Image (cartoon, rainbow, N blue to C red):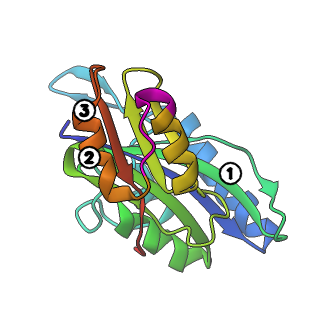
Amino acid sequence: MANSCATDLNVQSYDRETIENLYGLFTQLLNTKRTCTVNGQVRYGHPHWLGYVVTDILHKEVEEIPCRGTFSLTSEVTQRPSGAYSFSMFTETAWCATDRLFVELAKMYDLKILYREIEPGCQIFYTNDYNGEVFPERYILDSDIEGEEYFCTFDELAERIEEITGILPSEYDEIEQISELYDGEFLSVNQIELQDW
């Protein structure tokens, strides 16, 4: 596959029945065994393929909506502090999120879908969670010390950079220079930008 894009999603509705039914449809997709025979050979379909969301839930053709990738459910249905019901899922796709698929899903079921999309190779670091309801983190620090670490505020990020390098940045633009001075193997920071689908 091309560069892999990891997207965390939180699917919400104030209608509990809608969310429970949709969660049931996703669960059913994951539990469906799919096989076909091609030239006498049995081939097994991957139940996590996003194409099945397009065909079995949206009732569209896979040529209509980009669906290159897989999905998994990462939580069951819960009620949020706002009163909405939700479940969480994760997709791994090629290059970028399959946003059109989830825009169509949101329209069809009258949903609010919050996401965080990360694809470092293409410098994609986005969320549509403006209020930080599900994805409050706005910075990702990747280092040889801890790997990826997420931070909600610049101050939290700056303190961690100081712990690692001994230098406290006072603004985001100083971080690149600090990372160049760093004696370890690597230190990089990316800001998660706010963006609607």
Residue 69 visible in the shown view: no
**Numbered label attached to residue 24:** 1
Q: Amino acid at mark 2?
A: Glu
Which of the labelled discs sits on residue 48, or is there none? none
Q: Quadrant of the N terminus?
A: top left
Asked whether, in this view, residue 78 is left or right of residue 7, the answer is right
Asked if the stretch drawn in magenta spans residue 48, the answer is: no
Q: Residues within 10 Å of mark 3 (few under 14, many from 20)?
A: few
* Disc 1 packing (10 Å; few <14; some 14–19; many ≥20): some
Q: Position of residue 127 (x, y in %)?
A: 46, 63
Q: Which residue is mark 2?
A: 176
* Residue 35 locus on image (x, y percent): 37, 30
> For residue 165: magenta?
yes
User: Pointer 3: what residue?
Assistant: 181
Mark whose residue sits in front, 3 or 2: 3
Please give the name of the residue rendered at 40% of the width and 30% of the height, measured from the top-left corner. 165
Compared with 79, 1 (above or below) is above
Q: Residue at x 51, y 60 (%)?
A: 115
> Magenta segment, which residues?
163-169
In percent of width and height, residue 187 lies at 32, 32
Give whichever of discs 1 and 3 has the lower sequence position. 1
